[in-house]
Image (tube, helix red, strand yellow):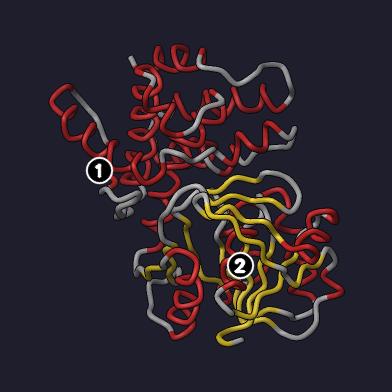
Amino acid sequence: MNGPRILVVGAGAIGGVTAALMADAGLRVSVLDANGEHVARMRQPGLLIEDLGEEKRVTLDAHDDPDTLEGRFDFALVTLKAPHLESALEPLVGRGLVDTFVSLGNGMVQDRIAGIVGEGRMIWGVVEWGSTNLGPGHLAKTTRGPFIVGEPDGSAKDRTRQLADALGTVDGANITQNIRGQVWSKLLVNSAFSGLGAVSGLLYEEVVDDPAGREAALAVWREGYDVGIAQGLELEGVLGVPADALVMRGPEDRGRVDEALAIAMNQAGATKASMLQDLERGLKTEVDVINGAVVEKGREYGVETPLNSRIVGLMHTMERGEREPGRDVFEELRLLTH
């Protein structure tokens, strides 16, 4: 065993795969997750991972109670859903178990985590690969892509390089001095493709293959892009393309956008939205910190966001069981683009 001691907080699709592949590479990894059955299976017989079709089973030091954790961790990788942040992180802070917390979840939750753990004890990050939760003790990594991490103030620190080295054992890791711009670019992915994937019940590539779905996705992306620019952010590339490559404002942009979409879907098209996985399990989604974050910032900076707002409403309706995901949402959303 070598490298930093790492605690993965939340062993769902992203967290569980990350923990297993780091442990398989020889890193010192522990896992904290509230699902007792999942934890038991991670311990014995081990977490079954389908890594792009290749199966492997990895036994993990897994816990469902923070009081059973021993020693101190250099990093806690926070991959939790937004509703569970306080209940999971406050005990770790109270016991002083972690030096640095790393935000790797979806949506705009970084300030909320900083309020729990302290701004100076945080590194921000994004995940550009996808995975699927197949049930307790069984996860699948479905696409490739790097982690991207950075200090909130843009500085270069030894801890960031140490973290990137550890994450690089999973699927590569890059360091950026503009993590705030990178996080917003990832939010465009989640709002456009995850948001629409969830309300339609489709994979990213299936959304894009539907003509009305493609039009809606590009309109959602454009709204979020304009909100990011209004904030003064320098938006970074994501899914192998510049953020502005997917901004379509007229017919003259069609060729450029179609080319960029093909590159992005080649990397992430097989992704099943985490919000769709939540809907299928009857769980509350993170739409309020994803599409809802675009709406909130749009309101603050005077940018209209009708499609993101409608996706939030659709998702809440589906969370309540009043409507099922389906392709019919695309036409409804398309009408808002005119």
Q: Compared with residue 186, is residue 310 higher up or lower down, i.e. above or below?
A: above
Give the amino acid at mark 2: Leu
**Measuring 35% from the left and 49% from the top, which residue is drawn there?**
239
Q: Position of residue 163 (x, y in %)?
A: 50, 76
Rendered image quadrant of residue 264: top left
Q: Compared with residue 256, is residue 27 higher up or lower down, i.e. above or below?
A: below
Between the C-alphas of marks 2 and 1, the distance is 30 Å
Mark 2 falls on what kind of element?
strand
How busy is the neighbourhood of tag 2: few (under 14 within 10 Å), some, or many (20 plus)? many
Q: Position of residue 9 (x, y in %)?
A: 69, 64
Q: Nearer the viewer, residue 48 or 244?
A: 48
Mark 2 or 1: the one toward you: 2
234 relative to 130 in the view: left or right = left
Q: Compared with residue 197, is residue 159 higher up or lower down, i.e. above or below?
A: below
Q: Quadrant of the N terminus?
A: bottom right
Between disc 2 and disc 1, whose residue precedes? 2
Q: Quadrant of the C terminus?
A: top left
C-beta proximity under 8 Å, tags 2 and 1: no
**Measuring 49% from the left and 82% from the top, which residue is drawn there?**
159
Residue under label 2:
77
**Measuring 74% from the left and 81% from the top, which residue is drawn there?**
96
Give the amino acid at mark 1: Asp
Residue under label 1:
244
Mark 1 falls on what kind of element?
helix
Label tally: 2
